[in-house]
Amino acid sequence: MLAGASVGLPIARSDVPIRLPEECACCAGIATHRVALAREGGVSSSVGYCDECAEHQASASTRVLSLALSSLLLALAGAAALPLVAPRLGLLGLISSVIAFSLLPFGLLCLPARPMSLPHSARGAAVRWSTSGRLWCAALSYAERVAQLNEAELTAEPLDERVSSPWLSAGPVLGVGAACLSFFVYHPLLRIINLGAVRIEVALDGQRLSAVDPTSNESPAAGALLRVPAGAHWLSVSSAVDGAALARVEVDFHSGAVHLFAFAADDTCFWLETTGYGEERLGEPSYVPLPSADHFWVLPGGIDTWFAPNPSARDPIAHSSGGLLTALRQAPCVDAPPEARSLRQ
Ligand SMILES: [Zn+2]
Ligand SMILES: [Zn+2]
């Protein structure tokens, strides 16, 4: 806290400016610089500073900006690096760590302030508008002169030296946005379907991921959809009934992609079915089989429908708007369209 005094001044208008003394506002020396002091809703006044005081006044404001900048850089670096260093960190864990990173530079504000030597009366700006709308002056003699020049009243008012700035919130706020973005990029989607007879437990690198109920028919709601850390991992499947190990597959999750793992899919075929509408109407849907020995796929983008057919090209509503729709389909291989059957692995 700095001792000082505040002066209650009317809002300055261009025709009635606030009158400030000529001398340096900090040390009362000869002012060689004029620094503009903006007031909300009023015209700005110019405060005199000597060379030395103009320098500490300016470095105090750049200090706030450098704190804001270092907070932002730490937050962004944390958001970019943490999902790689700690891939199992959840979204909430990532957000809290990024906020903690962004707050680190503010620890500097808690360090004891360096001692102030005479004739200075402030370490930063010696004159400021306080939140209550009064002009706060660090030097009592300067405040008295301001009160005298403007015929205003004066009150002793200590003021917290720490300057707050809306820029200081940039690190934590943008950090939260960057953490969410980076979480979704580094944690792609995995859909697991269970075509076996019993409920299964799926684990990623030995840690439980999800339980998945069996589904026998093609269904858009089948299975579980989860986010998993990108990179190479092991998926292991065990029976939820007796815990018996059923399968173990090495997988590679790609950032930003969508993946499918189908358990017990030996007699099931998967394929992409593209239907054209309007001007792009095709004679027949086109089929791309999706063979996989492990029943694990990194799927191409642009799948419109999961485990359900596209609307019919003869549908009058679908007919009116042109374009292509792609559906991911599944069926027992004996029932799949011949073009969609993948070679049995
Ligand atoms: Zn000075
Ligand atoms: Zn000074």
Image: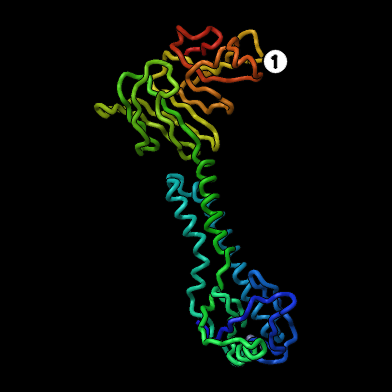
**Secondary structure beneath label 1:** helix
Q: Is residue 345 visible?
A: no
Question: Callout 1 environment at 10 Å: few (<14), some (14 to 19), or many (20+)?
Answer: few
Classify residue 194 as left or right of residue 140: left
**Residue found at the far left of this picture:** 242
- Disc 1 marks a residue whose amino acid type is Glu
Residue 106 is situated, as x and y percent measured from the top left of the image, at 51, 68
Residue denoted by label 1: 279
Q: Quadrant of residue 20?
A: bottom right
Residue 243 is situated, as x and y percent measured from the top left of the image, at 27, 29
Q: Is residue 284 visible?
A: yes
In the foreground, 273 or 77? 273
Q: Quadrant of residue 220?
A: top left
User: Is residue 280 shown above or below 42?
Assistant: above
User: Is residue 160 shown above or below 236?
Assistant: below
User: Is residue 220 shown above or below 41?
Assistant: above
Which residue is drawn at the image coordinates 59% and 70% (left, top)?
A: 64
Which residue is drawn at the image coordinates 55% and 86% (left, top)?
A: 5
